[in-house]
Amino acid sequence: MQEYEVKRGNTADLDDRINAGFRDIFQTEPAAADGHYSISYGSMKKLEVWAGEKNKTLLVDTVTDDSILKLPDEEADRIILDTNKKFRQFLDLVTCFTTKERVKRAKKAAEKGN
């Protein structure tokens, strides 16, 4: 499980952005249960997302679809790259931080933890 910080001032409509991200980026409606939203897409057998405490963080749990690795390399690479690209776009939209900003914040958090 991963936890991503949500940009200040963007916590009120977090659920709406989660749903919009699934619809707009992954082109699918998520299954919803108890505030958790999940889909299956590309190389992810399961992508489950939910809001953390006071919507200040986004919690993400993924399960990889190992059957992708049994495909020819060219086809598997295409699926994996597409999945990773869309996952990053989804995180950008939902957290309101770019990939570069998320990496920077994760490094700072790791340094504080040590």
Image (spheres, rainbow, N blue to C red):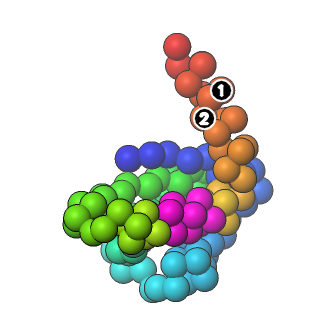
User: Majority secondary structure of the magenta segment?
Assistant: helix
**Looking at this rendering, what residue extends furthest in the right direction?**
9
114 shown above or below 76:
above
Residue where numbered disc 2 is placed: 106
Where residue 46 appears, as percent x and y from the top left, is: 32, 66
**Residue 14 visible (yes or no):** no
Q: Which residue is mark 1?
A: 108
Residue 84 magenta = yes
Find residue 45 and report its horizontal and vertical position in percent. 29, 68
37 is higher (above) or lower (below) than 107: below
- Look at the image and say whether residue 21 sits in the magenta stretch: no
Q: Give neighbour class at mark 2: few <14, some 14-19, many 20+ (Cα, 10 Å).
A: some
State the SS at label 2.
Answer: helix
Residue type (three-letter) at the residue carrying disc 2: Ala
Q: Is residue 39 above or below residue 64?
A: below
Q: Are marks 1 and 2 in contact (CB under 8 Å)?
A: yes
For the residue labelled by badge 1, is the local secondary structure a helix, a strand or a loop? helix
Stretch of the chain drawn in magenta: 81-90
How many numbered callouts? 2
* Amino acid, disc 1: Lys
